[in-house]
């Protein structure tokens, strides 16, 4: 159970970040780890369908964008309370997943990759030309809203713990899901969908439900990202962002509960701190990714699990 | 005037389609036969363009530099296949995505380290400058015509290779049923290396021919890579014929959308609305097209018969 | 008595932070160091280093450290890097920024912390108008200014019909707005192309060719790699012989080598050129070429001026940079030797400066360079200053 131990150690560290930041007088840690946690939530949402369901979505950034724009548009129009913004973000993302789900889930394998990309690209171009809400410029969110009327979100620490709570919730959801009957069916579909159908499961409905759940959770991540960066723009739903989410999930260990958390943290931190070392950091990161694929099967979660098994 | 414009835009669409075909042909073969998603295919396109620029500076002749660059890209392709990709064939698609994404990062930065951050200069060969009037009143750049002809020639050669030769038979068989080909005693690793090298050379050729038109810079392969994936999915993964049809369709659709959509919309919508909606929908057009094709034919237009 | 006063003054100097002189200056510089536009970042970084050389590595006489941050051409990363500079590196000034959209998102982090932000390139209209800030300065230009100069030049030369083409992003729209503000003739057509993924203009060129009556000029704005594609394809399409191309920020030393002959003879407007005759510029360009072996671009010139501006302010307040009002007053005086020969600040902290017409020519060494042909606008102030509520 090395992976679980590593995950709890990381969560404990993340929980301690505000205290450490205060102690070292380094408030920037809240920004960088807060952002990493948001991406971890997005990666967890992607893992729900990619890791458990074997459905490779190359368009998950679209949900981040929808969630972000829901917050941005409501905020610009004076609807400030996150208890209104969040349901709107989650609902809009879930609705988009439901509508596109009927089309994308007809396909599988590589075709699924590309058709999810297609919908994400359409949305990307739509927001790019949405002059009313900043177009290509993106949308500045004038001020962080309130939580049930209280102005707590202006405190970086409060915002940080809010994101932390959502992250913990997402992990719990993911863990519960694997063990549930729903999760079993989903994993069954991944290994052999025909068999699941023969067993009498309506696999399409299970996959659609998973897709909607995943989209909605990713929309939540998008809402948090917008709140954190006080900005949303088309760049958050560029296809390269979808690609990065896949990289995070695979790097961390797909189909595991904690893999996306490891992956998001490792990918973003590696990028940030290698970038400080040399501007040619891609020449290091590239081979690192290849080495992870070649020698660390199962990603970081697999690596931790093997380390934990050693006597 | 509109008829002339239509002819010109059709040629433009054809030329874009041909470029996409050169990228997609290799991609679809590699995907179809080796079951490998190679994101680094765009890097080979970039490497082709960089090699062309480098060899042009070295030799002073585009006609010499072009084949050299294609060969060099082929060599790089084979080297990458042997060192990294070979171990990935048996792996999950996602492992391939991650590893080849790593390759993209490596190649982009490697090229920058070797050649510097500045875009390279790659001019048209002197004999291919200028325009020709195919239809009176509509001059068309000669070099783009050459691209169309080279592309069509490559398509014909590929067709002959795939349909008429023993290697082609193996390729077709591989796309339909890989295990069976292996069971028949074919040297699979060598076949794979050969196919990958062929794909790399085609991508390199694409880069060589794009070099004089676009800016030779790092990252130039990524946008065209995405379009190439759209092409092979529409065409049916593994099908060279499908890639050709889809590439031409996408090229013409995209060009026509950018040129005429705003005007067409203006027939139904207020001018102002058409001016804003036109370019937006034009950008989405190929993705709408792909979604529609996959909705009605989930495996693309020309999927290889048995899998 | 005298001693007592001296002690009191000393105690005041020690205990009241605002008049406390810094012993070290730290500047954060945000630019693009990876991905395709990295060449622009290199020009800017090289210029900053040269400016430091010229100042004996001392800003305002104090030891200086410059922290470079890569925005990766992404507003989200740019914002994160700006937060990092302010909160972690605790820099005294932030400078740099190539892209308007990156600057627009990153500025909040810097301005909220009341750190002075000097834009070395991006000049979106938002920051020049209603959202101008007492902590924001620009050593480049407001986006609209340079195309306004081009509009004026075409008016002066009685060019009657112009086709306008530009990328569809904030700076692109500012450029078009600026051009149309000044240009009095007829606009034959206007196209905004997707940014940054658009790299083939054959469809647009065919459209331009089909317009009747034929436009007398094409006005274009394509910075960086896009400008290389655009200029090459414009020449290849045969349009260059039919309709002269006028540009802003499209032909400069970061692109000229790759554009080659295709750029020859293209005219553009600019606030500065490597051949602008003044002593500071001669030293800047000469030493730059000597140190790095290439001709500096306007990105480099602006970055050099950013450092020199900061130096002048730190010098004027004698290192007491905690006194923000004094620093601001000093910055506003723009009391430094600029490579552009002359500039002062408008009330919105954007430069009032000259704009010149320049043309791409063959350099003596066989490469390409630009030559200034004349002044188009004298001491030009941007159009948004009136909307900025700052008064000083």
Image (tube, coloured by chain):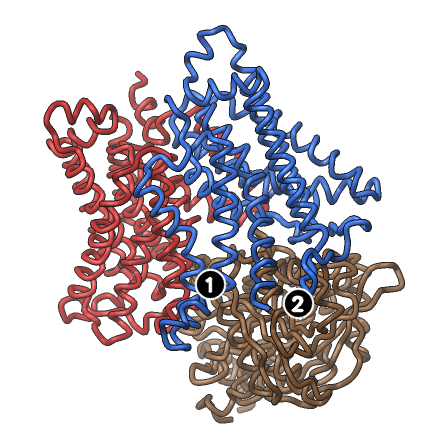
Chain colours: A red, B blue, C brown
> The C terminus of chain B is located in which quarter?
top left
Percent coordinates x, y for residue C330 in the rendering: 58, 84
The reply to whether callout 2 and callout 1 are in contact (CB within 8 Å) is no
Disc 1: host chain? C
Left/right placement of residue A143 relative to residue B4 reads: left
Residue under circle 1?
C82
| In front of the other: C200 or C214 | C214
Secondary structure beneath label 1: helix
Location of residue C363 by image quarter: bottom right
Q: Position of residue A101 (x, y in %)?
A: 24, 45
The picture places residue A174, in percent across and down from the top left corner, at 20, 39
* Quarter of the image with the N terminus of chain B in it: bottom right
Q: Residues within 10 Å of mark 2 (few under 14, many from 20)?
A: many
Q: Residue at x 17, y 42 (%)?
A: A209
Q: What residue lies at 52% left-to-right and 86% top-to-bottom?
A: C348
Q: Nearer the viewer, mark 2 or mark 1?
A: 2
Q: Is residue A122 above or below residue B292?
A: below
Give the residue at mark 2: C250
Q: CA distance from mark 2 to mark 1?
A: 28 Å
Residue C60 in view (yes/no): no
Farthest right residue in view: C364
Q: Secondary structure at mark 2?
A: loop
């Amino acid at each position: 159970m090395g992976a679980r131990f590593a995950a709890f150690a990381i969560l404990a560290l993340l929980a301690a970040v505000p205290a450490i930041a205060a102690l070292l007088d380094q408030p920037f840690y809240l920004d960088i780890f807060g952002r990493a946690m948001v991406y971890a939530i997005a990666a967890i949402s992607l893992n729900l369908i990619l890791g458990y369901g074997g459905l490779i979505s190359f368009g998950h950034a679209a949900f981040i964008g929808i969630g972000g724009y829901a917050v941005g548009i409501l905020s610009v129009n004076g609807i400030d309370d996150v208890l209104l913004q969040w349901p709107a973000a989650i609902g809009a993302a879930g609705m988009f997943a439901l509508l596109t789900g009927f089309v994308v889930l007809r396909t599988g394998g590589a075709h699924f990759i590309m058709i999810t990309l297609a919908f994400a690209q359409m949305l990307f171009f739509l927001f790019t030309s949405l002059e009313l809400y900043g177009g290509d410029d993106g949308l500045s969110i004038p001020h962080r809203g309130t939580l049930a009327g209280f102005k707590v979100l202006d405190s970086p620490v409060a915002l940080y713990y809010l994101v932390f709570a959502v992250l913990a919730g997402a992990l719990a959801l993911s863990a519960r899901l694997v063990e549930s009957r729903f999760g079993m069916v989903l994993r069954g579909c991944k290994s052999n969908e025909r068999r699941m159908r023969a067993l009498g499961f309506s696999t399409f409905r299970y996959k659609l439900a998973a897709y909607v759940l995943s989209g909605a959770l990713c929309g939540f991540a998008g809402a948090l990202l917008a709140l954190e960066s006080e900005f949303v723009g088309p760049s958050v739903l560029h296809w390269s962002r979808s690609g990065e989410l896949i990289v995070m999930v695979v790097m961390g260990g797909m189909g595991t509960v904690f893999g996306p958390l490891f992956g998001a943290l490792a990918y973003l931190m590696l990028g940030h701190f290698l970038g400080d070392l040399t501007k040619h950091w891609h020449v290091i990161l590239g081979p690192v990714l290849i080495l992870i694929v070649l020698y660390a099967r199962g990603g970081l979660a697999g690596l931790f699990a093997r380390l934990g098994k050693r006597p | 005037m509109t008829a002339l414009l239509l002819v010109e835009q059709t040629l433009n669409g054809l030329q874009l389609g041909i470029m996409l075909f050169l990228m997609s042909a290799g991609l679809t073969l590699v995907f179809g036969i080796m079951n490998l998603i190679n994101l680094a295919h765009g890097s080979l396109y970039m490497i082709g363009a960089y090699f062309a620029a480098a060899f042009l500076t070295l030799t002073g002749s585009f006609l010499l530099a072009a084949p050299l660059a294609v060969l060099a890209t082929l060599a790089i392709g084979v080297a990458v296949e042997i060192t990294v990709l070979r171990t990935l064939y048996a792996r999950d698609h996602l492992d391939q995505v991650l590893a080849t994404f790593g390759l993209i990062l490596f190649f982009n930065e490697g090229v920058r380290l070797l050649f510097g951050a500045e875009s390279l200069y790659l001019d048209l060969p002197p004999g291919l400058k200028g325009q020709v009037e195919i239809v009176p009143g509509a001059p068309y750049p000669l070099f783009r015509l050459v691209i169309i002809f080279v592309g069509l020639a490559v398509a014909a050669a590929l067709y002959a290779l795939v349909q008429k030769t023993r290697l082609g038979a193996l390729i077709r068989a591989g796309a339909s049923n890989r295990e069976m080909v292996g069971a028949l005693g074919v040297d699979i690793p060598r076949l794979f290396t050969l196919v990958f090298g062929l794909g790399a050379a085609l991508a390199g050729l694409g880069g060589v021919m794009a070099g004089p038109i676009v800016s030779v810079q790092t990252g130039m392969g990524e946008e065209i890579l995405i379009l190439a994936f759209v092409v092979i999915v529409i065409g049916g993964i593994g099908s060279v014929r499908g890639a050709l049809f889809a590439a031409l369709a996408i090229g013409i659709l995209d060009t026509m959308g950018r040129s005429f959509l705003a005007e067409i919309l203006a027939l139904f919508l207020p001018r102002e609305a058409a001016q804003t909606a036109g370019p937006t929908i034009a950008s989405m057009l190929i993705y709408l097209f792909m979604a529609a094709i996959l909705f009605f034919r989930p495996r693309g237009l020309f999927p290889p018969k048995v899998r | 008595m005298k001693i007592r006063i001296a002690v009191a003054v000393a105690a005041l100097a020690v205990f009241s932070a605002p008049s406390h002189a810094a012993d070290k200056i730290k500047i954060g510089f945000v630019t693009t160091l990876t991905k395709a536009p990295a060449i622009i970042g290199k020009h800017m970084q090289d210029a900053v280093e040269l400016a430091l050389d010229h100042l004996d590595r001392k800003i305002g006489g104090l030891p200086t450290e410059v922290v470079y941050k890569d925005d990766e051409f992404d507003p989200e990363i740019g914002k994160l890097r700006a937060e990092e500079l302010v909160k972690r590196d605790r820099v005294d000034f932030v400078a740099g920024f190539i892209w308007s959209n990156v600057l627009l998102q990153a500025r909040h982090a810097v301005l909220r912390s009341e750190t002075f932000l000097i834009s070395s390139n991006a000049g979106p209209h938002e920051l020049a108008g209603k959202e101008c800030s007492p902590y924001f300065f620009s050593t480049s230009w407001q986006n609209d200014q340079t195309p306004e100069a081009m509009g004026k030049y075409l008016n002066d030369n009685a060019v009657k019909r112009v086709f306008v083409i530009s990328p569809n992003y904030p700076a692109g729209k500012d450029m078009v707005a600026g051009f149309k503000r000044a240009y009095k003739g007829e606009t034959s057509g206007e196209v905004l192309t997707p940014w940054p993924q658009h790299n083939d203009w054959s469809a647009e060129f065919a459209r331009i060719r089909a317009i009747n009556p034929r436009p007398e000029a094409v006005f274009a704005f394509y910075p960086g790699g896009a400008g290389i594609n655009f200029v090459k394809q414009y020449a290849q399409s045969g349009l260059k012989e039919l309709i002269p191309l006028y540009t802003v920020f499209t032909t400069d030393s970061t692109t000229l080598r790759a554009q080659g002959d295709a750029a020859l003879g293209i005219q553009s407007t600019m606030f500065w050129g490597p051949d602008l005759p003044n002593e500071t510029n001669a030293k800047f360009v000469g030493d730059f070429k000597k140190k790095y072996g290439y001709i500096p671009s306007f990105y480099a010139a602006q970055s050099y001026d950013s450092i020199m501006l900061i130096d002048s302010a730190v010098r004027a307040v004698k290192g007491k940079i905690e006194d923000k009002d004094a620093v601001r007053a000093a910055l506003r005086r723009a009391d430094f030797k600029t490579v552009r020969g002359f500039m002062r600040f408008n009330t919105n902290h954007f430069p009032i400066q000259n704009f010149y017409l320049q043309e791409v020519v063959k350099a003596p060494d066989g490469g390409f360079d630009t030559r200034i042909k004349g002044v188009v606008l004298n001491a030009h102030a941007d159009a948004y200053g009136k909307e900025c509520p700052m008064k000083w």
